[in-house]
Amino acid sequence: GHGCDFLPVAFDDTSEDVARQTAALRNTHAHFNTAHYATMGAMFAKAARLVCQAVVEGEGRAVDLVYEMLNEVSAGSKKNARDAAGRASAAGGSVPTASPASQQSRQSLPGSPLTAADAVPELDPEASVSAPAAMSGAYASNRRGSVRATAKGAALRKVNATVTSADINDVLATMLKGLPLKGAAAKGARAAAGTAGDGSDASGDDDAVDDDEDMMDLEDDDDSSWKVRKSASRCLLTVIKARPDAVPALISALLSGEALLVKRFNERVENVRLEILDLFRGLLTACRVKPSTTAHAAAATGAGSLTGLGSFSIAGEEALRSEAAGLTELAVPVVQSLVKAAKHKSPKVKQAVFALLGDLFTVMGKRLGSTVTACVAATVDNLKDARLALPHLRPVVLDFARVLVHVMLKVAQATEDESFVTSLERMLPVVAKCAEEKYYRTVVAALKVLHAFVPVTAVAADGPKMADALFTALYARLAASDADQDVRRAAMDGLSVLLKESERSLTATRGADVKQAIELIISLLRQESTRIAAARAVMHIQRCTLEKKQVADIATELTSFLRKQDRQVREQGLRALAGFINVHGHGLAEGAMGGVLAELVNPNVQLLSDKELFLTVLALQVAQGVVVAPGMANAAMDKLAPTIVQLLKSPLAQGAAVTEAGTVLAIVARAGHAAALFSHLSQAAQVCETGALTNLAHAAGAVIGAEGDAKKQTALVEECAKLAASTDGRKALAGVALLGDVGRFTKLSSTSGLKALESVLSKGTDETKNAAAAALGRAASSPSGADVLASLIQAIAGTPADLLLRLRALRESLLAMPAQGGATNPTLAGSADALFASLVKHTGSDNESVVETAAECVGRLAHAVPSIVGTVAAQLPSFAEGPRAAVLSSIRFAMAQTVSPALDEAVRGHFPALLAYIQAGQPVKVRRAAVQLLTAAAYNRPALVDTPAVRDSAFPELLRCTEVDKSLIEVVDLGPFKHTVDKGLDLRKQAFECVSVFADSLSRPDGVLERTGQIDQVAARMVASLKEPETDHECWAAARGTLVKLALHARGAPALLAHADDLAANLKTMVGLKVKEGQEKERIDDAVRGAIVTALKINGAVPSIAQNEKFTDLMQTAAKSAQFQKASESLAE
């Protein structure tokens, strides 16, 4: 025990392998027989705490003396261990190494299960490790105080190697053996020590619970086995937090089979039971999977990264890791066991039990429906017990009650079982009573539960009575003069939702109280501490019956929010004002609406600017409610329209801001101001930056589309056509851009607009020609542009001089169409097959730009008309090499657009046939196209590549595509010199990129590369690519990047360790590259720096690789390189 106390100060930079610490710990545990168990519990507990430190810090090495002490203790020589610890303390921080005798005993201990492979390496007998004397003195004088804790943290040193996965497995084996040891083993230990006590098994039944309770009065001197269980639990929780790669092993060991961890819920010692409950809670959190935040992953897998340990939010049932499938089956028995544990007399145990119940119900949701009645009873009993009215316990129980209400409501709605609602009615009075307590945390938690009860009033048999009880409890806390701010916010949130849902029934019985509650909410809008919560409440009560004075007061207060400097206040004010004006705008006086308009255009506030587009969108939504109010159109035209036009002139304005601005201007245009607005927009388009033309054109299209008079509308289109025909390039560009968006709302063929675009397309400058092509495409994408689309398709069927521009126009049109847009566009649906044939014809062109654009059009066409995928698969074999490659790769453009289930289904059915072109017998161009398709699928639709066809055939062939094919290398004799042409280089580059995309998936749960089961093959291929015959620097860079991605994954690190020798040798060769004649110095320097950065990253991600001699030699060579400093700086950045 004393040796373990000294262990932390022995960590040092020069110590040897951490595996010795693990081996010594296993040695120690091997001698936990009935004769030594009681006396060794404390020592094991201290050793486990040290393992926790090593795991958390990712490092840990100990001097030889510690192993000598551990081994002497495990052999029963406690006196020798104490003497050695005393010598170490007296040495003032200088710790001698082990004697030869102890080194020999370390390798061969009586009864030790260790094999020769577990033998501890020898140390230099002359070596010693120094620790600060102050730390040593602190341990000697104050082993249990805060000084020891401070010294222990300060004593952890950074070293070259860390705890590896193998070490973690050894620790888990030891800890798992320590976790269940109690009962019979403890009884035998006490018998050997001359003590007596009752034991219990770990069956988890009531008898075991009784036995555990009977043994709670045992002293540590009689039985120290609880220290083993507590330390084992804490160590396992530390592993969960610090080493996610060990979680699958823990899940299997603790939750599978006999469910060891669940059986320990009946632990007799309170501190140990708390640790075990905390361990289960941490394991549950580690098993939880959040939806991915990335669009392509969310669309394909619906799952994302693991959450950290912490609180849960109420979001219904959640996904669990695949390894935790057994947890679903255990959930009901676990809840039943926890409900029994909730009867424990210790408040700390109750608090931990209800916290864990809340997590379980949050994750499992309706799957725990059979246990909710028992949980309600346990919750009510604990809330009723006056002895448990503690400020730290009641809030936890109430938090669980809130989760329980949500789950029970879902179960009641799904099963139509009224018994669940009846159970909730039993809970309501108890929760309302808790809302009257004096502890504000308890009151806030109770008010949140009452808030959760509001939806229950809609399904309860006596809903009005329940609503009345809720109103009484919530209004009482809101109206209390001495209420805490948090209490008022929680009461206001619940009361506003209640008024929204049950205003009619409450007004019928308590009309005066309802009016007074609304007045109170309005008054709280004026208080700085509650105004944000009050604004949220207004969003709920805005559809309630309000008096005219109340409406005016609310509008005045919310308008004042817009002048505040606090961004959160302005945001909440805009949100509340947008909805409130839409509901009550017609009842507001013109002066009140004018005040809102004045704040929106106030240059000091700058709500309508490009500085913060999120608030700009909210302000434009408020503006929509203002301009539709009676008598406000003229004021909006004079004050609001110029501000919006100025906003649209900024290239930074984009997305929702442009859309909402167009909507506001369209409303103003419908009031008879279309011509004036179009004049403003047209003039702005002639002087704005090119990047803002799209914004102004979008608004102009909305304005002309809002003009109800057909003659006036035609006149405006003619003005656009005049601009497009201008000899002034700037005016022509503005006119062309305007015509493109105007064509989305009007029929250009009935005016001179279409002729103007055709004229520019044939006679304009390069800039105006490209703009005209884009304008034609935008006009052709709408139903009113069917004739424009038909003319495009007809032109593309031939070979016009401006074919490339026509193809770009078609691409623009198809891009603007939604998924399966062909179903709603008769022109496109009726000519899809003919258009496909025309595009395939153009993929055989000699013009590379025409080929690429035509291929992209095929992909966009497949997105709009998914049946084209089947046509592609059927006709590919008949195409020549060029068209076959172009059309095959075109499908990737369809997958790059928005998610389309119909497209995914069409691709899934033909995907194996399309990927068959990756095989070696196909031309290089076609193979590269197949790799491009596989890359796009892996990035945008991972579910498509998670198939046996990809795992068994396509992916192995992909790895072969990264190899240098000497048959594709030609040497051209140019007389004085020879030139080498590598026809397979583009294929290899694309293959390396595809492998890198697969490696990216390792950052997501169930990544496609992990599911292929070929991580080791990928590591071997990437390592081999770092040497000749591969000499391309881009391929080297891609291979290095993939290796780093593998190193960051738990299953990729072992693969790198298996190839550490070759990896180190290849990187060392790369680090030693010298510039030869004909080579670029910058490229060689980049390769050297890249190799050094790769070595540093892998060394940081897989610290145990530093134990490889060749890799150590590599790091030493890299440190001597002239590029090492720059590489280190780039890594730091």
Image (spheres, rainbow, N blue to C red):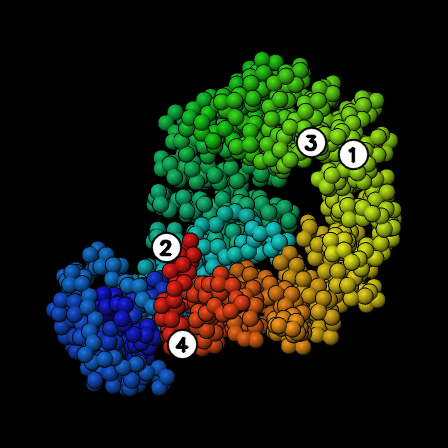
**Residue extending furthest front?**
976
* Left or right, 132 with reference to 110: left
- Front residue of 276/58: it is 58
Counting from the top left corner in percent of width and height, residue 308 is at 45, 55
Q: Up-down: is 67 above or below 570? A: below
Earlier along the polypeptide chain: callout 3 or callout 4? 3
Mark 2 nearby-residue class (10 Å; few <14, some 14–19, many ≥20): many
Contact? badges 2 and 4 (CB < 8 Å): no
Dot 1 falls on a residue whose secondary structure is loop
Q: CA distance from mark 1 to mark 3?
A: 20 Å
Earlier along the polypeptide chain: callout 2 or callout 1? 2
Residue 1054 can be seen in this image: no
Say which of marks 2 and 4 sits in front.
4
Say which of marks 2 and 3 sits in front.
3
Dot 2 falls on a residue whose secondary structure is helix
Residue under pointer 4: 1110
Earlier along the polypeptide chain: callout 4 or callout 1? 1
Earlier along the polypeptide chain: callout 1 or callout 3? 3
The residue depicted at 67 percent of the width and 77 percent of the height is 967
Q: Up-down: is 601 above or below 736? A: above
**Residue extending furthest left?**
90
Q: CA distance from mark 4 to mark 1?
A: 68 Å
The residue depicted at 52 percent of the width and 72 percent of the height is 1026
| Numbered mark located on residue 349 in the image | 2
Residue type at mark 1 is: Gly
Counting from the top left corner in percent of width and height, residue 461 is at 61, 38
Q: Quadrant of residue 749?
A: top right
* Left or right, 749 with reference to 435: right
Residue under pointer 3: 730
Q: Up-down: is 671 above or below 15? A: above
